[in-house]
Amino acid sequence: MNKEFKVILVIAAGILVLGGVAAFIQPQNDTHGDIVGEQNGPVLLTADHTSFDFGDISMKNGKVDHIYKIKNTTAEPLEISKLYTSCMCTQVALLLEDLEFGPFGMPGHSGIPEINKTLAPGQEAQVKAIYDPNAHGPAGIGLADRQIIVETKQGSPLLLAFTANVTP
């Protein structure tokens, strides 16, 4: 083989390898709304609402937050094991008996430790979502659709969501 052909062959092989790596690490979509915790049974927590719309929010006004009220609807104690979010621009905290646990973020961007807090039968707690419209910079202008995941040891996760229309 001549030298030029070998160079072209090496370059083509390199492009194929890089293309394969890029396709492998590329997210399947960019909605930030598809994170779902491990499904291990029925959803045993209820929420006063599972979605919220912040409406139009301005980047110049900074972070906004919203409270979801959750409740153990079972006749047994229920252990909340983890809280996390679908995007780095959102943090979440658990408010239980005048104590705050968190904030927690997105898996891969911050550690998501197990919190293992127990809700007695019928007991309520609050989940506080904190959204930073500046986290994505100018590329973050427009519709934001995010999820908060509340995992329990005994059932499937409770999914909470919010939307916001981010303006400069």
Image (cartoon, helix red, strand yellow):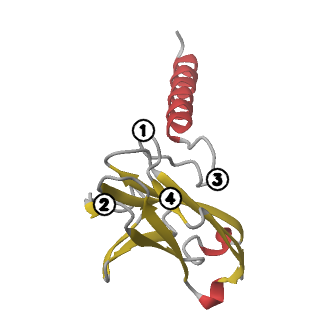
- Residue drawn at the location 50% of the way across and 58% of the way down: 46
Spatial distance from mark 1 to mark 4, Cα to Cα? 14 Å
Disc ID at residue 46: 4
Front residue (pair 105, 37) = 37
Disc ID at residue 111: 2
Of callouts 2 and 3, the N-terminal one: 3
Spatial distance from mark 2 to mark 4, Cα to Cα? 26 Å
Is 115 rendered above or below residue 22? below
Front residue (pair 56, 6) = 56
Q: Quadrant of residue 19?
A: top right
Residue holding disc 3: 31
- Would you call the spot at circle 4 few (<14 residues within 10 Å), some (14-19), or many (20 or more)? some
Residue holding disc 1: 41
Image quadrant holding the C terminus, namely bottom right
- Residue drawn at the location 57% of the way across and 86% of the way down: 62
* Image coordinates for residue 53, horizontal then vertical, percent: 69, 71
Local secondary structure at mark 3: loop
Spatial distance from mark 2 to mark 3, Cα to Cα? 22 Å
